[in-house]
Image: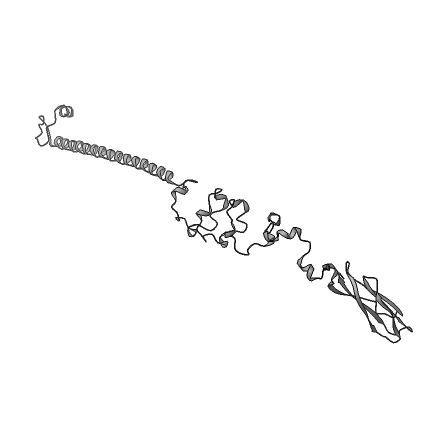
Amino acid sequence: MADEHESKPRPESGQPHEHPPGWSDADTALEDLIEEEEHEIHSNRLLIIGAFAAIALVVAALVLSILALNRNIESVAKATPKDNSVGESAIEDGAVTSTKIANGAVTSEKLAEGAVTSNAIAPGAVLDVALAPNAVVTKALAAGAVTGKKVASNSLTGANIDESTLGKVPSAAAADSASKATNATKLGGVAAASYLSGVKLVQAESSEDLEQSKAVTASCPSGMRVLAGGIALSGALTGVALQQSAPAGDTGWTAVAVAAVQPANPWKLTVTAICANGG
């Protein structure tokens, strides 16, 4: 009966079914069940096809998004500034100020030689506190960059100047031929070395003991001459007499003192020489 049922064409939807003789209600129920299953399979097939189509669209959209993202990343990477990518011509005058630069961000190694000229620095823009110790060396200064007008008054001393580079003072042109200095006339024509200078007192003393006779000489420092001298006695002086107090040549003063009897207590002889340069 089943083969006979399948061999017949199925009526269109809404049309009554024609059944062969002997068709029972059970056959009709089975036929309806089969039709419902076929309809459900057909509907599921459409849903599956739609789902695949939707998935394909999503995948296509995802691929397009990835391609667009890659292009954006490449564009951003290309737009990222590289070393030396911003030249002077791309920066407006005054656009970069000291407040926009981190402390220590710009070092001498990051500046091309000659990149910063005096014309590029505003008056008073670079202060002493902005320069590290020894940051500006001679080779960093362009020839002629430091002129007399840029040096503060009285800021240079003799220690900063190479005297061999100085020329003759115009007003001292006659110094080479001068036969007598002006102050020589005031000294009466006598050389300055003939006058006394640097007067100094020099003392020498004996031991403080019971010796009966003592001799002491106070010598002037090398190069000085003695002008005068004196003595002093201290301790037990009973019976002590001065035998000599005189210059020791031109370079010192000498003295001798003697006790008449053996001293009972210690005593000392001190000699002072007055020395000076010149004379």
Rendered location of residue 11, percent (x, y): 10, 28
Which of these two is toward me, 170 or 61?
170
Left or right, 200 with respect to 182, comes to right
Residue 142 position within the rendered picture, expressed as x and y whole percent measured from the top left: 51, 44
Examine the rendering and report whether any part of residue 253 can be seen: yes
Q: Quadrant of residue 75?
A: top left
- 28, 253: nearer the viewer: 253
Front position in the image: 40 or 70: 70
In the picture, measured across the screen, residue 169 lies left or right of residue 49, that is: right
**Spot occupied by residue 99 in the image (x, y as percentages of width and height):** 42, 52
Give left or right: position of 114 versus 163.
left
Classify residue 234 by image quadrant.
bottom right
Observer able to see residue 272:
no
Q: Which quadrant of the structure image shows residue 250?
A: bottom right
Which corner quadrant holds the C terminus? bottom right
Q: Which residue lies at the image location 22% right of the left edge and 32% below the top edge?
A: 49
What count of labels does the image hold?
Answer: 0
Q: Quadrant of the N terminus?
A: top left
- The x, y position of residue 12, in whole percent, is 10, 29
Q: Nearer the viewer, residue 229 or 37?
A: 229
What residue occupies the far right of the structure in this picture?
A: 261
Image vertical order of residue 78 relative to residue 263, above or below: above
* Left or right: 253, with 123 as reference point: right
In the image, what residue occupies the spot 41% across and 43% down? 88
